[in-house]
Image: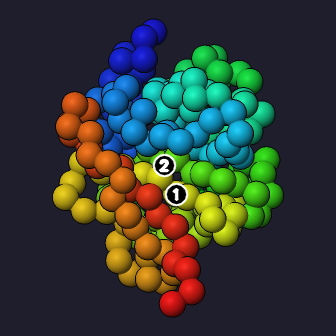
Amino acid sequence: MTKATHFAAEWLRNPKRVGAIAPSGADLARAITTGLSHDSGPVVELGPGTGSFTDRILARGVPACRLAAVEAGAGFAGLLAKRHPEIALAHGDAARVRTLVPFTSGSVETVICGLPLLSMPLAQVFRIMRGSFDLLGEDGEFRLFTYGPKCPLPFRIKQRLGLRSDRQSFVPLNMPPATVYTLRRKGPP
């Protein structure tokens, strides 16, 4: 079964969990992984789906031993396990990211998020963000994308966790066009 067929099957099973009409394109994968290299890591990927970002993370040179992925969809998790058996893959809810990945608190450099945060309950989004920022080091980055006009993380969650969002890039050739944001801890005032 191809990546596109897997994507369509997962979307038909649960369109709200998939949250997109097509897998992320190569241009978006390049944009969201900009700056990653052999020296990067650990890296955690949330919601890898068909593996577009996973492929690009590894192509940028991040060693497989420094990459962990969390995927809730059984079909997507099975596909990724076959394509990339060398990475740490957990089939589960990203709200439990701290217990699902093999990295310790404060040791992760980057979290790449492919989850449809806008279609998730706020409590689940909060747990995902809190768990991710527990794993991230002080200078760590949480990268995500949206098809909408602003950062998909609600202001109150950013405020509660002490985060700031920065628009990194616009990817007009993705289908649909997407914007990449980076979330970081706010520095001292």
* Residue 136, x across and y down, in percent: 66, 61
**What is the basis of the colouring in this image?**
rainbow
Residue extending farthest to the bottom is 189
Element carrying mark 2: strand
Crowdedness of circle 1 by 10 Å Cα count: few (<14), some, many (20+)?
many
Q: Residue at x 80, y 58 (%)?
A: 104
Taking the image as shown, residue 144 lies to the left or right of residue 56, namely left
> In the rendered image, which quarter contains the N terminus?
top left
Taking the image as shown, residue 167 lies to the left or right of residue 72, namely left
Q: Are marks 1 and 2 in contact (CB under 8 Å)?
A: yes
Q: Is residue 109 above or below residue 24?
A: below
Q: Residue at x 42, y 33 (%)?
A: 30
Give the residue number, with chain letter if any, for mark 1: 142
Kind of residue indicated by mark 2: Cys
Q: Mark 1 vs mark 2: which is more N-terminal? A: 2
* Residue 116, x across and y down, in percent: 37, 50
Element carrying mark 1: strand
* Residue 172, x across and y down, in percent: 20, 37
Of the residues tagged 1 and 2, which is closer to the observer? 1
* Residue 170, x across and y down, in percent: 26, 46
Q: Which quadrant would residue 4 be assigned to in this image?
A: top left
From this viewpoint, is residue 24 visible? Answer: yes
Q: Residue at x 70, y 45 (%)?
A: 41
Give the residue number, with chain letter if any, for mark 2: 113
Query: Observer-nearest residue: 149 or 117?
Result: 149
Kind of residue indicated by mark 1: Phe
In three-dimensional space, the C-alpha distance between marks 1 and 2, rounded to whole angstroms, equals 7 Å
